[in-house]
Amino acid sequence: MAPDDKTLKIAETRAKPTQQRSIATYEKILAASISILSEEGAGALNTNAIATRAGVNVGSVYHYFDDKWAIVQVLMERMLSRGLGVINSYVISLVQTDDTFTWSRNLLTDVHRMRLNHPGTAQLRALCRTVPELEKLNLEVEAIVREHITDSIAQRLPGMPPERRLHAAYTIQQIGALWLDRALAFDTAFEPRLDEMALMLSSYLNTLDAEYL
């Protein structure tokens, strides 16, 4: 399907935890950070607050991370990696699916469920629009997703010109990402709107099929 190098590269941290105790401390720091983000917002996030919430001294935080943004980057990378895992399975199945509405509905449902199951996702998504390093990371991941979608479209619709495939991949990605961001950040009543979201995406896919199948 997609080349092996189309994956998210995780950033280096100051020190890599290898022993069970150090791994536990590292994960406590990350868990405390996402907890602060989800409960109090980005304004409350600082290394002292993270250390207090994690139950460690602030030196332990700096042992692994340069600053709070290094922590946020790891959290962001983990979130994006989870998203890639879910999305890629659907991108692969797009090649042969006959029911684009069900495909679209299941994709949107699973991505939304993944985000709801991991508190802090909305705050991380918001931060990626305001912090240059995170915005760059998000754009890199979007590029990876577009490559995967483009590969899938090429297999489903081999007659589509390469430039049109790129535009189609961008459109498919944006329909899903923008609607889901809105649902996650502003709309708890996701289910009533799910069919409308799926219809929008499947209608676009059906239009492409009508042109090139």
Image (cartoon, helix red, strand yellow):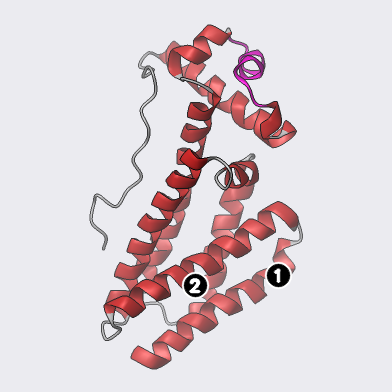
Magenta segment, prevailing SS (helix, strand or loop)? helix
**Mark 1 and mark 2 residues within 8 Å of each other at the beta carbon:** no
Q: Secondary structure at mark 2?
A: helix
Q: Nearer the viewer, residue 206 or 65?
A: 65
Which kind of residue does numbered mark 1 sit on? Arg
- The percent position of residue 98, horizontal first and vertical second, equals 43, 82
Q: Is residue 48 shown in magenta?
A: yes
- Residue 150 in the figure: left or right of residue 180: left
Q: Which residue is mark 1?
A: 193
Q: Nearer the viewer, residue 150 or 199?
A: 150
Q: Dividing the image into 4 quarters, which one contains the N terminus?
A: bottom left
- The percent position of residue 208, horizontal first and vertical second, equals 42, 85
Q: Residue at x 61, y 32 (%)?
A: 34
Q: Residue at x 62, y 46 (%)?
A: 126
| Magenta residues (range) | 45-56
Q: Residue at x 59, y 74 (%)?
A: 198
Q: Quadrant of residue 32?
A: top right
Q: Is residue 205 shown in magenta?
A: no
Q: Residues within 10 Å of mark 2 (few under 14, many from 20)?
A: some
Q: Dividing the image into 4 quarters, which one contains the C terminus?
A: bottom left
Q: Is residue 19 above or below residue 208?
A: above
Q: Secondary structure at mark 1?
A: helix
- Residue 182 in the figure: left or right of residue 102: right
Which kind of residue does numbered mark 2 sit on? Trp
Q: Is residue 190 above or below residue 23?
A: below
Q: Nearer the viewer, mark 1 or mark 2?
A: 1
Q: Which residue is mark 2?
A: 103
Q: Residue at x 55, y 61 (%)?
A: 177
